[in-house]
Image: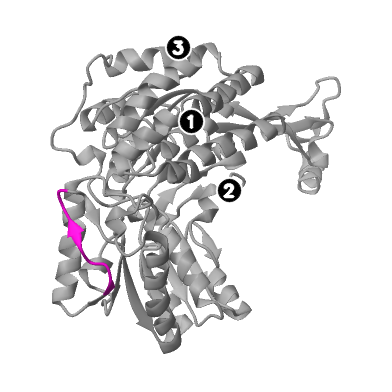
């Protein structure tokens, strides 16, 4: 996600909320449920998943209104990027849960026969999920779906930066699940710090790299396994293409949905050669105008920044680069009190400019020109591994080189963003962009211990050949057995 102001950096934490129990009191029933294994049976897992799905359907309007209040999301965008993907994730999980839960037989070497061996997914126990503000419903509940499917008891900490959605989760999740299995704890930085001080069997955090390090350090004290969903500057490489208008629409869609506050949004464009550069500068403005009209501020489909602080940060970075000679191709206007920045494309940005120093997490798209595809690949390789990488080209050789040389959470050819909505694809980063992954079966396995199990009868002790003492005969036999 973002390297921008995030929840653990708030100067005045919102915790404790009125009526919110102390963290230890909130965590206690989850820990007891994990000890009692109440979430282990498949029937319980399926019932809780169905309850979450029904909650999303019955209270669709409530969640859509909360997302509109927090981020100015239209109901259509809320369905497209939050409510719809969660329903799809639940449906996919319910369809496959029985097969995921089955132990998987593995072969046993002849030297250890007769014996049977298997790998059995078992719940980790008590899981902490720390959500993010930019997709405050989807990024809170998608990990919960995987954790519940794996048979865990869960504490969910939604982001206080999206208070309307956090309040809806606080009220509706316990009501849907009867107060069992998933406990929602609202609060700011102090609350999260208290949660991190508790012992857990797994922690999943979604947010910025700086806070991700804090979570990682806290987890290390108790050797708790973690999944960190972070972010980075996701590149988009464009060569000259036969359908530049289609290319521009797909880049604009991935970049400007949710006002650019998407962890896998294109963060900058590398245009390969003068013709590709011209295509980008000509067709991106046209795509933006097609999506949001001449006045994006009046568009019902264009969102707002999460805060004035975030808006001011981006406006200042843009002003710094324009003063240094960058050229605004389209957009550029901002309203800090209104938390608004126009969809903006900037040309003439240098590799060390303000807009290229860190993840933008907003609706400003720098365009840089490079001479060759290899120069673009070297540019990406010289920087921290991003959460996503995108390529638009008509040439198979370019696709092969991009897939071979780019190290990122995902390599996507010809489209942006869509991979995040496919439940069967793992979602996660590498290096600075994250640790681990989830969604679908990968999420189920993330929140499971894939426990090895071995059964060997004692009726015939075939291991006598390796027991000491090791005389000449056994010394000759053992290497052959191994």
| Distance (Cα) linking label 3 and label 2 | 34 Å
Query: Horizontally, is 105 left or right of 441 in the view?
Result: right
The part of the image, by quadrant, that contains residue 342 is bottom left
Q: For mark 3, does the 10 Å Cα neighbourhood hold few (<14), some (14 to 19), or many (20 or more) residues?
A: some
The residue sitting at 47% across, 76% down in the picture is 238
Q: Which residue is mark 2?
A: 422
Q: Determine whether the residue tagged by mark 2 lies in a helix, strand or loop.
A: loop
- Which mark is drawn over residue 144? 1
Q: Which residue is mark 3?
A: 32
Is residue 230 positioned above or below 136 on the image?
Answer: below
The residue sitting at 23% across, 38% down in the picture is 8
Residue 173 visible here: yes
| Distance (Cα) linking label 2 and label 1 | 17 Å
Q: Nearer the viewer, mark 2 or mark 1?
A: 2
Q: For mark 2, does the 10 Å Cα neighbourhood hold few (<14), some (14 to 19), or many (20 or more) residues?
A: some
* Earlier-in-chain disc, 2 versus 1: 1
Residue 169, position in %: x, y?
39, 26
Query: Horizontally, is 192 left or right of 176 in the view?
Result: left
């Amino acid at each position: 996600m973002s390297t921008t102001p995030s929840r653990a950096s708030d100067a005045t934490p919102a915790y404790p909320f009125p009526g919110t129990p102390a963290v230890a009191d909130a965590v206690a029933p989850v820990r007891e449920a994990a000890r009692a294994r109440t979430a282990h049976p498949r029937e319980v897992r399926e019932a809780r998943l169905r309850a979450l799905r029904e909650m999303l359907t019955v209270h669709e309007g409530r969640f859509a209104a909360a997302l509109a209040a927090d981020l100015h999301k239209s109901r259509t965008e809320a369905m497209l990027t939050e409510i719809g993907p969660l329903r799809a994730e639940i449906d996919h999980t319910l369809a496959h849960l029985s097969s995921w839960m089955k132990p998987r037989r593995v072969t046993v070497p002849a030297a250890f026969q007769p014996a049977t061996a298997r790998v059995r997914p078992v719940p980790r126990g008590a899981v902490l999920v720390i959500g993010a503000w930019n997709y405050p419903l989807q990024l809170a509940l998608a990990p919960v779906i995987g954790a519940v499917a794996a048979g865990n008891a869960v504490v969910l900490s939604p982001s206080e930066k999206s208070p309307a959605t956090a309040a809806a989760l606080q009220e509706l999740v316990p009501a849907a699940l009867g107060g069992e299995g998933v406990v929602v704890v609202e609060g700011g930085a102090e609350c999260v710090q208290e949660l991190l001080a508790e012992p857990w069997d797994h922690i999943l955090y979604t947010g910025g790299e700086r806070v991700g390090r804090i979570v990682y350090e806290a987890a290390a004290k108790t050797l708790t396994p973690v999944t960190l969903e972070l972010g980075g500057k996701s590149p988009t490489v464009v060569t000259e293409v036969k359908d530049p208008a289609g290319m521009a629409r797909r880049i604009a869609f991935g970049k400007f949905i949710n006002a650019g506050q998407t962890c896998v949004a294109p963060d900058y464009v590398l245009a390969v050669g003068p013709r590709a550069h011209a295509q980008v500068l000509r067709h991106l403005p046209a795509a933006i105008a097609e999506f949001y009209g001449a006045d994006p501020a009046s568009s019902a489909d264009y969102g707002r920044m999460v805060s004035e602080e975030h808006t001011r940060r981006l406006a200042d970075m843009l002003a710094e680069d324009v003063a240094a000679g960058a050229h605004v191709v389209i957009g550029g206007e901002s309203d800090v009190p209104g938390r608004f920045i126009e969809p903006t494309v900037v040309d003439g940005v240098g590799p060390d400019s303000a807009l290229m120093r860190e993840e933008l997490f907003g609706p400003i798209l720098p365009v840089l020109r490079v001479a060759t595809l290899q120069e673009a690949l070297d540019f990406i390789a010289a920087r921290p591994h991003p959460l996503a990488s995108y390529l638009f080209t008509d040439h198979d050789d370019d696709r092969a080189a991009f897939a071979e040389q780019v190290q990122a959470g995902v390599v996507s050819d010809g489209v942006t963003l869509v991979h995040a909505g496919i439940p069967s694809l793992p979602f996660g980063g590498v290096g600075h962009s994250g640790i681990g992954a989830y969604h679908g079966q990968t999420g189920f396995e993330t929140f499971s211990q894939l426990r090895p199990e071995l059964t060997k009868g004692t009726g015939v002790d075939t291991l006598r050949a390796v027991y000491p003492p090791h005389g000449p005969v056994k010394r000759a036999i053992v290497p052959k057995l191994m």
